[in-house]
Image (tube, rainbow, N blue to C red):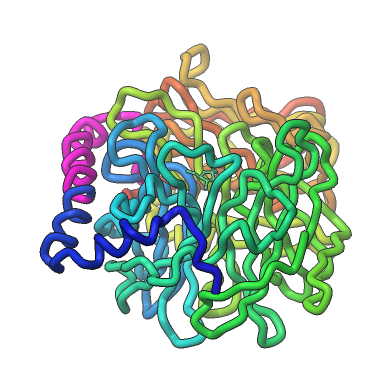
Amino acid sequence: MNFRSRIFPSSLLAFFLLPLSSRAEMTNEALARANAAIQAAAPRAQADPARPIFHVTSPGNWMNDPNGPIYYKGYYHLFYQLNPFSDGSGPKYWGHVRSRDLAKWEPLPIALWPSSEAGEAEVWSGCCTINGMGQPMIFYTSIAPGKSAQTHAEQWAALGDDDLIQWRKSPSNPVLSETLHGAKKIYDWRDPFVFHEKDKTFLVTGGNLNETKGGQAAVNIYEAQNAALTEWKYRGVLFLIPDPAARTAECPNFFKLGNEWVLFVSPYGKVQYYVGDFDAETCRFHPRTNGFLDYGPNFYAPNTMQVPDGRRLVWGWVTGFPEGHGWNGCLTVPRLLSLSRDGQLEQNPAPQLAKLRGKAVKFQNGLVGICNTNTMEIQAEIDLPTAKTFEMQIGDAGSKSLIVVSFNGTELQVMDAKAPLTLTGGRKLNLRIFLDRSVLEVFANGTVCITKTIQPPAAAANLTVHVDGGSSTAKLIHAWPIKTIW
Ligand code: FRU
């Protein structure tokens, strides 16, 4: 195992020679500062009328990517990138929440923080898995102080207790270092994701092979050499993103959905998916179809979880909130993944979200209704046999916070975000709309998603539906107030 790293052996040795109590104080000090900063921000965050109530947020300050989603011992666990010190981006820690039912969530203590005594400044994104010895294990990207993440990174691990609440850094860190690549240089090397196939354990990372020009965004693959998952072998580039505009491949997720292999990458732009075959011997991926996970401007860095029945959920980071409110960022609702017959990715809100619904308001023919809340779900089934356009307004006409969702026959539009949408099977449009104060998530026919932040946040909303240019029936429109997940 290669131990060359930025952890200078002398400082590491000095740290381990300290009495246990002083070691604990050193780490607790970083943690205590982080907790104090979160606590200081929380009242302002909570008082902000724009802060979502049924999307996962940190108790205060900044959050970004969902990290390490895992179902373990009766709980769905989600970790997330957290800057405890401000509501703008900054040094990253791992926040933690868990849920028994995917509806109600419980905030938990910070799971990972930088081990400054071991030469670590930030703990970036990664995954959580159970190693071959049955130990919960987090893999993440470790960033050193004063070094650019573009040119220097290591992949570290931490071992967890049975509740996944307390973590200790692996004595084998770094578990993957750049020396694995030999002469090859991988820039922006990060975001480890572990998966298994044919009795083997693999790990993928994102990065790019050409720092200055871009256009060589690469997903790299490694194969585990021991059951403890502390030794790895570089198996090359799993897949080079063909899109020349993709500058890098952040947060790769690679998993089996039915009989197909699916790759997600976040390329500093719209998140892409690819569907195809994986050869576990050669470690190469051959996609047949591809597309975007979400057409909105505020969706990034999704991460997936396999649940006990074998299905898979995804959460994305909802970006694009203003600073200065004591919080910033949330996760999408959990989305259940599937594939259509022609290899398109389908995403539908996890059925468990229905537990959060209050009393239904039903609109059958008179298509105007009062919901009187700005935290709600709308479900609409619309037949558009000949109609050219469809438009739904949430809010009061003329008001600044009016939300407009429309379809013109070829394109779905949510405010200013547009997505191509083809109606099949009798021209049916099925919409699921989740409005959570300043967050809007729209699902159309399972194949198109648009996530958007809205400023100012939605007002307690009326609902109006217009259909122009021909016959159509809004078979049924339901709306439910949605309760908080906390
Ligand atoms: C994606 C990302 C990851 C990185 C993390 C840092 O948003 O840039 O590549 O690990 O955020 O917070």
- Tell which residue pokes out farthest to the top in this image: 398
Q: Position of residue 373 (x, y in %)?
A: 36, 35
> Where 465 falls versus 255 (above or below)?
above
Q: Residue 188 placed where, x, y %?
A: 62, 44
The range drawn in magenta is 31-57
Q: Does 378 sit left or right of 254 as displayed?
A: left
- Residue under the point 39% across and 56% down: 8
Q: Is residue 364 above or below residue 111?
A: above
Q: Is residue 51 magenta?
A: yes
Q: Nearer the viewer, residue 289 or 379?
A: 289
Answer whether residue 38 is magenta in the image: yes
Q: What residue sits 32% from the left and 68% below the top?
A: 168
Looking at the image, residue 312 sits to the left or right of residue 121; the answer is right
Residue that appears at 30% across and 26% down? 325
Q: Report which quarter residue 256 is drawn in.
A: bottom right
Q: Residue at the location (63% across, 35% down)?
A: 296
Coordinates of residue 205 in the picture (x, y in percent): 63, 57
Q: Nearer the viewer, residue 157 or 37?
A: 157
- Quarter of the rendering occupied by the N terminus: bottom right
In which image quadrant can residue 28 be found?
bottom left
**Left or right: 432 as drawn, with respect to 143:** right
Magenta: predominant secondary structure element? helix
Number of residue marks: 0
Q: In terms of image quadrants, where is residue 208?
A: top right
Residue 230 higher or lower than 146, as above or below? below
Relative to 483, say whether 458 is above or below: above
Q: Is residue 372 visible?
A: yes
Viewer-proximal residue among 120 and 324: 120
**Observer-nearest of 84 and 96:** 84
Answer yes or no: is residue 364 visible: no
User: Residue 125's x, y, as percent?
Assistant: 49, 52
